[in-house]
Amino acid sequence: MKRIRPLYLIGVFLTAVLILLGSISFIASSKHLDILSEDSRKAFWQNLLESFDWENFPWDTFPFEDYADFPWDKLPWDDLPLDFDWDKIPWDNLPDDFPWGDVPWKDAPADFDWDKIPWDNLPEDFPWENLPWDNMPENFDWGNVPWDNLPEDFPWDKMPWDDLPEDFPWDKMPWDNLPADFPWDKVPWQDLGEDFPWQDLPWENIPPEMLPLLGIPWLLVPPDAVPDGIFPEGFFPWEHEHQVNPLVPWVVQKEATCSEAGVEINYCLICKQTIERDIPATGQHVFDRNLQCTLCHRYRLVCASESHTAPYGDTSDLQYEEAHIVTDRSAAIDLSAYRVEYFGFATLSHVGRTANTFSVRVYDREGNNVTGNFIVERIFGTLELGKREIVIRTESAEKPYDGTPLVCMRWTAEGLAEGDQIVDVLFGEGQTDYGWRSNEIIGFRIVNALGEDVTAYYAVRMEWGKLTVRPEEN
């Protein structure tokens, strides 16, 4: 483009007009071209434009708005001056045959008002590829671009993908009609948000290598929108509980043995992935005459714990750490080559009975734990904490008859556990008439040092004294 020569503008313009019609007649007639016939108007403009010195055309003073039929196709678009006033052109009111392809869009000034472009009424052959996509102003309204109506050959590679504004209308992109070479890796997936139409993405057309599997907010994506084959094997980003078709049987992939769990597989109806679950070990060993399992090749070792009984109070926690090998049921191995350790015995802290459970470890001469070489079977003895036997005795008393009841609240107890005591003792009624009755206790409790009721832990034998009323003395 060439700069205008301001000193010549008016002169050149007037000279051209005088040559054609004379300056005065030109101004008068040109503002009233609408009264001329169409052929006359075309002839007028043709003669006028052919006579102008376009290098010195008075762009900044020419009244374009006064001429509805100005021949825009005749402008020297490829040779506009640097200070050409783009805003003078009535972009939203240009004729249907306007040569949009001739406009040097890349030369548009930085302050060009792009809002004046009639985005929703551009012709099908609009040269989208000529727009300065990588040099749009910061205030460019990307939402005005008719993204859904862009041509198939739209130059997507010219978009400033790394410099788009935060409010770029990603939801208006023609996702289902993008070319095969669309730069999917430029889409800021993590910033698209909850309102983005994730279900409209053509997942089947997106090259898997351009999908940042760990960068897409999958919790916002409807699982049903993503077809099979998009994710690599084993990748399913949504948390869910596997569901299987109850009519489809599980398929055994690995049989369970006597000591090892098996595996069976099925198919999840949600994530379409193969799922598996364990089959418990059968525990069914097959022993030869040497008591070695023919399946897992381990030796049988049977150990038994001892039983023990004690009364409540002799010990706070009953435990009996004694066990032995049952030789007639165990493999005939050289026990001198191994050390069997028993540990983790059960403890009984209340009156009752329980199994004397325990655990077993086997070590070789070097101290290595070789328990895994044996099929350890345990036979549990019992621990029994019995009730503690005690005796409660009441004292005897007597008196001659005097019409008042004879009462004696003296008693003793034998055999209480250390720290326990009898409380809340309640005696029966006394003896008033002639005769006698047992000095009975009708209620009591036994508590330990913590105040806990331990009455149930005792077997109590009662020995009553006598309450005797003699005849009245003379």
Image (cartoon, helix red, strand yellow):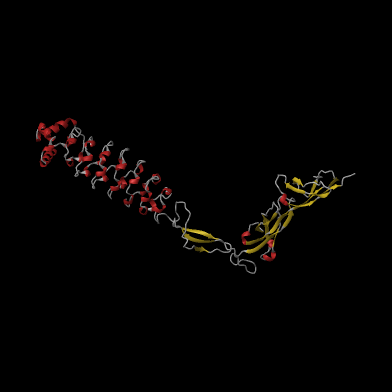
Q: Name the foreground residue: 124 vs 426.
A: 426
Look at 72% across and 49% down and name the residue there.
455
Quadrant placement of the C terminus: top right
Quadrant placement of the N terminus: top left
**Res. 168 image quadrant:** top left
Q: Position of residue 95 (x, y in %)?
A: 19, 42
Query: Is residue 393 in view from this perspective?
Result: yes
Q: Name the foreground residue: 289 vs 389.
A: 389
Q: Position of residue 171 (x, y in %)?
A: 35, 46
> Can you name the residue that lies furthest to the right here?
474
**Quick check: 10 left or right of 454?**
left
Look at 18% across and 42% down and name the residue there.
73
Q: Position of residue 238 (x, y in %)?
A: 45, 51
**Res. 7 image quadrant:** top left
Q: Name the foreground residue: 105 vs 281.
A: 281
**Quick check: 238 left or right of 127?**
right
Query: Is residue 419 in view from this perspective?
Result: no
Residue 57 drawn above or below residue 206: above
Q: Position of residue 210 (x, y in %)?
A: 38, 50
**Quick check: 346 left or right of 189?**
right
**Quick check: 319 left or right of 64?**
right
Look at 33% across and 47% down and name the residue there.
173
